[in-house]
């Protein structure tokens, strides 16, 4: 029994999930999203007004996904989500030259094993500037 107890103490521990700490404003997506969520309407209207008012102002859309799927799949999905946000802004009169997309794909900070973690990574962060 003592040997088994020692083995359990020395067994490798599972990796800890690391929840993101977005430093900007974020729009959260579900894996099957086919458009910008309705919950983002007010945020995007505010950004559209700011961008229309100042043609020198730019906005970066940094898109991320959870770790489900291949690297290529996650990169394409993050690019698609950022594209939805960009399209929404352009429909509101924002010039395409004011919006920059950075598709990041899946999180690179370790595994997500809970839905809470995965949900936190499925987002597009909006940041002023390039």
Image: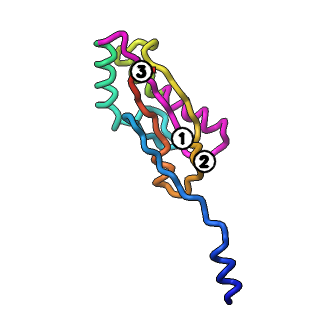
Report the residue marked by disc 3: 129
Looking at the rendered image, the disc whose residue lies closer to the viewer, 3 or 2, is: 3
Q: Residue at x 54, y 34 (%)?
A: 78
Range of residues picked out in magenta? 54-83
The extreme top residue here reads: 55
Instruction: Check whether the beta carbons of the residues at disc 2 and disc 1 lie within 8 A of each other.
Output: yes
* Rendered image quadrant of residue 3: bottom right
| Relative image position of residue 86 (x, y in whole percent) | 45, 23
Left or right: 66 with respect to 39? right
Label 2 residue SS: loop
The residue lying toward the viewer, choosing from 24 and 106, is 24
Left or right: 94 with respect to 122? left
Real-space CA distance between mark 3 and mark 2, rounded to the nearest whole angstrom: 30 Å
Report the residue marked by disc 2: 68
Q: Residue at x 64, y 37 (%)?
A: 73
Mark found first going from the N terminus, 3 or 2: 2
Image quadrant occupied by the N terminus: bottom right
Label 1 crowd (10 A; few <14 / some 14-19 / many >=20)? many
Label 2 crowd (10 A; few <14 / some 14-19 / many >=20)? some
Quick check: is 66 in the magenta stretch?
yes
Left or right: 41 with respect to 81? left
Q: How is the image coloured?
A: rainbow
Real-space CA distance between mark 3 and mark 1, rounded to the nearest whole angstrom: 22 Å
Label 1 residue SS: strand
| Relative image position of residue 22 (x, y in whole percent) | 42, 40
Instruction: Check whether the beta carbons of the residues at disc 3 and disc 1 lie within 8 A of each other.
Output: no
Real-space CA distance between mark 2 and mark 1, rounded to the nearest whole angstrom: 8 Å
| Relative image position of residue 117 (x, y in whole percent) | 49, 52
Q: Residue at x 39, y 21 (%)?
A: 89
| Relative image position of residue 16 (x, y in whole percent) | 55, 58
Report the residue marked by disc 1: 65
Q: Is residue 114 above or below residue 82?
A: below
């Amino acid at each position: 029994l003592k040997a088994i107890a020692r083995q359990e103490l020395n067994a490798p521990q599972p990796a800890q999930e690391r929840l993101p700490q977005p430093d900007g404003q974020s729009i959260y997506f579900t894996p099957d999203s086919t458009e910008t969520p309705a919950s983002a309407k007010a945020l995007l209207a505010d950004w559209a007004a700011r961008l229309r008012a100042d043609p020198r102002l730019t906005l970066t859309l940094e898109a991320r996904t959870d770790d489900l799927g291949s690297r290529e799949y996650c990169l394409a999905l993050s690019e698609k989500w950022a594209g939805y946000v960009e399209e929404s802004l352009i429909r509101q009169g924002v010039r395409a030259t004011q919006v920059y997309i950075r598709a990041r794909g899946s999180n690179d900070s370790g595994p997500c094993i809970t839905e809470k973690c995965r949900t936190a990574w499925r987002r597009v962060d909006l940041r002023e500037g390039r």
